[in-house]
Amino acid sequence: MDLDIDCLREAKVENVERLAHALGVKLPEHKRHDRRAYNRELIRVVMQGIRRDAERSRGRRFFGRS
């Protein structure tokens, strides 16, 4: 399944946080004065985690072949 940034923007924050935990991504600090800043940072780190996970997956497929 491909996730893009628009999907993450539409998702509930709680679900994006769950995805971050599943990817092993450290959650950003909560910024109580600006919730939108937290959401943007959260989406940014999750997208980085998704990209990192995809790169690792591609590497395993490449090196796993005989």
Image (tube, grey):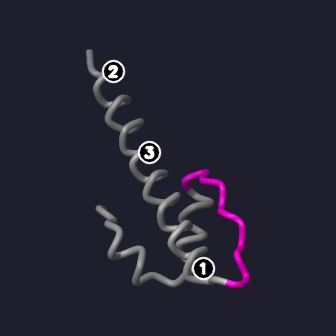
The local crowd at label 3, few if under 14, some if 14 to 19, many if 20 or more residues have their Cα within 10 Å, is some
Which quadrant would residue 36 be assigned to in this image? bottom right
Against 49, is 43 above or below?
A: below
Verify CB contact (< 8 Å) between mark 1 and mark 2.
no
- Tag 3 residue: 53
Residue 3: x %, y % from top left = 33, 65
Task: Look at the numbered discs 2 and 3 and tell me whether their residues touch, using CB distance below 8 Å.
Answer: no
At a point 34% along the width and 23% down the height, the residue shown is 64
In the figure, residue 58 lies in which quadrant? top left
Name the element at disc 2: helix
Of the numbered discs 3 and 1, the one sitting upstream in the chain is: 1
In the visual, does 18 lie left or right of 5? right
Identify which residue is drawn at 35% across, 29% down.
59
Please rate how many residues cluster around mark 2, counting C-alpha atoms within 10 Å: few if below 14, some from 14 to 19, many from 20: few
Residue at image x 51%, y 84%? 12
The chief SS type of the magenta part is loop
Whether residue 10 sits left or right of residue 27 in the image: it is: left
Amino acid type, label 3: Asp
Label 2, label 3: how far apart the Cα atoms are: 15 Å
Measured as percent of width and height from the top left, residue 31 is found at: 70, 76
Return the disc, 2 or 3, that comes first in the chain's sequence.
Answer: 3
Q: Name the amino acid type tagged 1.
A: Glu
Question: Which of labels 2 and 3 is toward the front?
Answer: 3
Q: CA distance from mark 1 to mark 2?
A: 36 Å
The N terminus is located in which quarter?
bottom left
Provide residue 5's location: percent of width, then percent of height.
35, 69
Indicate which disc residue 14 carries.
1
Q: Earlier in the sequence, mark 1 or mark 2?
A: 1
For numbered disc 3, what is the local secondary structure? helix
Expressed as whole percent of the image width and height from the top left, the position of residue 45 reads 52, 58
Q: Which residues are magenta?
A: 23-33
Q: Name the disc covering residue 63, or none.
A: 2
